Image (tube, rainbow, N blue to C red):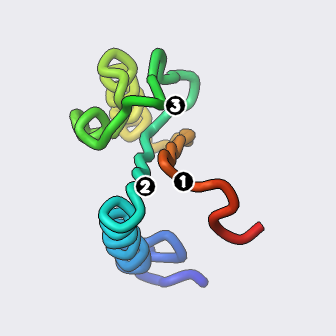
């Protein structure tokens, strides 16, 4: 589906519902089941976060910078690369990683 105004499947208007639902689900899982879920930017192009301890990472670490990368040195390089790519009129890809802690074995569907 393509919108003539430039939006599409991943437009902000279409994504906002998923983001809101995820935020609510995260709170419910935390309060009811003691399950924590945190996602962060692991890499942008060739720049990768280093020394991220999955056992202790939390939202404070992720929210510390604009690119949501818990490695401060990598985050600075990522921001610079993103800015340069934007100035060049290009786009760039990346990888996110999601860590879920406290999830009991067998929860969910296969």
> Which mark sits nearer the N-terminus, 2 or 3?
2
Q: Nearer the viewer, residue 93 or 30?
A: 30
Residue 80's label in the rendered image is: none
Q: Residue at x 36, y 67 (%)?
A: 32
Residue lying farthest to the right in this orientation: 110
Using the image, determine if residue 83 lies above or below residue 107: above
Q: Secondary structure at mark 2?
A: loop
State yes or no: discs 2 and 1 in contact (Cβ < 8 Å).
yes
Q: Which residue is mark 3?
A: 43
Image quadrant containing the C terminus: bottom right
Q: Which residue is mark 2?
A: 35
Using the image, determine if residue 43 lies above or below residue 93: above
Using the image, determine if residue 76 lies above or below residue 88: above
> Which mark sits nearer the N-terminus, 2 or 1?
2
Rendering quarter of residue 60? top left
Q: Residue at x 65, y 68 (%)?
A: 108
């Amino acid at each position: 589906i393509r919108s003539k105004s430039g939006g599409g499947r991943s437009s902000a208007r279409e994504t906002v519902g998923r983001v809101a639902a995820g935020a609510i689900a995260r709170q419910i899982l935390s309060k009811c089941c003691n399950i924590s879920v945190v996602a962060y930017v692991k890499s942008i192009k060739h720049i990768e976060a280093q020394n991220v301890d999955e056992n202790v990472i939390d939202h404070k670490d992720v929210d510390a910078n604009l690119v949501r990368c818990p490695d401060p040195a990598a985050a600075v390089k990522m921001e610079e690369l993103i800015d340069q790519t934007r100035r060049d009129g290009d786009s760039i890809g990346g990888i996110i990683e999601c860590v879920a802690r406290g999830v009991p074995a067998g929860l969910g569907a296969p």
